[in-house]
Image: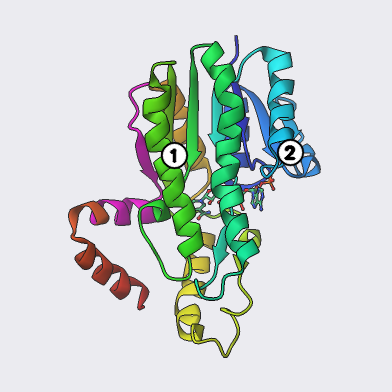
Amino acid sequence: MSKVVLITGASSGMGRASAEFLSAKGFVVYAGTRDVKEIDNYKNENITPLKLDLRDQKSIDAAVAFIKSQHQKIDILVNNAGYGLVSSVEDVKEEEMLNQFNINVFGALRVCKSVIPLMRENESGLIINISSFLGKIGLPLLTMYNSSKYALEGITDSLRYELKDFGIRVHSIMPGFFDTKFARQNLVTNEKTFDANSPYAKIVATLAPVIVEQINNGNSAKEVAEMIFEIIQNPKFPARSTVGDKAKKFIPMKKELSDEDFERRVIEYYNL
Ligand SMILES: NC(=O)c1ccc[n+]([C@@H]2O[C@H](COP(=O)([O-])OP(=O)(O)OC[C@H]3O[C@@H](n4cnc5c(N)ncnc54)[C@H](OP(=O)(O)O)[C@@H]3O)[C@@H](O)[C@H]2O)c1
């Protein structure tokens, strides 16, 4: 019987690449999205678009119940949906701060909450969290995004213990910079921080264009899809893995150097 996969944020980028890659490998793919019309555009008959509002447990439960009614199982969950807030801490609005965690952290937790009972009933399952190399490394103006991805890393670590006796594996993928819609559509900027007269104008001018350029010239989303496939195939795959040039450069460096030496390298690299 084909394996059933649910991917969140599947209308573009890594989510879409993974949906297309896995469906081509014979998986039954449910592509969770805010806007199913975006996914209808794929015209791929092995992918079923599913409306999913990550802020709303009922919307998620309904989507999971629908998959259960069709297959009695979900083998693989890929928590992929996410966006990045770019703001100084002093400027961030309450709503911006809460929404960043509501999608990147609580959204993933809500989907886990809904899917785990089904995986537990079947005594088998795999959860893959798409985090970021910025889930282990901080950068200025990305405090909210960084901390949401650090939180996702913590979720992976805790859930691995919590679910191991039920035959459910939990893994994290930490991508470097990837050429997706992320910089074009899903980087949200705080007005005050990006004002020309802001005390943060210098760091905005130094860092923001470089990050956008590095994302837009980043690796191909297909590499993430291939890694997801490897994790599915190999039960001994490492708990946490890096993909993409920037992740492979910075994560080992972070492990090897003291915090202060690492910080000096980042300051030098980004001219901070
Ligand atoms: N691109 C990079 O350089 C990079 C690097 C490291 C980690 N990541 C992470 O990789 C994941 C996928 O990103 P991507 O690069 O493939 O970018 P993308 O093409 O912008 O896709 C992100 C997806 O997340 C969903 N999403 C965005 N904002 C949302 C919101 N406010 N509420 C609900 N869903 C929302 C969207 O799904 P729908 O429109 O289908 O609802 C969107 O398709 C994200 O978690 C991101 O943080 C990206």
The magenta-colored residue range is: 235-253
Q: Where is the N terminus found, in terms of image quarters? A: top right
Identify the residue at image location x=42%, y=50%: 150
Quick check: 269 above or below 239? below
- Percent coordinates x, y for residue 234 in the rendering: 38, 22
- Percent coordinates x, y for residue 72 in the rendering: 66, 12
Is residue 236 a member of the stretch shown in magenta? yes
Identify the residue at image location x=64%, y=43%: 9
The amino acid at mark 2 is Tyr
Quadrant of res 66: top right
- Percent coordinates x, y for residue 240 in the rendering: 36, 38
The amino acid at mark 1 is Ile
Query: Considering only order in the chain, which callout, 1 or 2, is on the residue closer to the N terminus?
Result: 2
Q: Is residue 257 left or right of residue 205?
A: left
Quadrant of res 113: top right
Q: Badge 1 is on which residue?
A: 155
Quadrant of res 38: top right
Colour scheme in the image?
rainbow
Camera-nearest residue between 47 and 112: 112
Quick check: 156 above or below 206? above
Mark 2 neighbour class, 10 Å CA radius: few under 14, some 14 to 19, many 20 or more: some
Q: Where is the C terminus found, in terms of image quarters? A: bottom left
Identify the residue at image location x=31%, y=68%: 266
Identify the residue at image location x=40%, y=42%: 154
Q: Residue 42: which numbered mark, if any?
A: 2
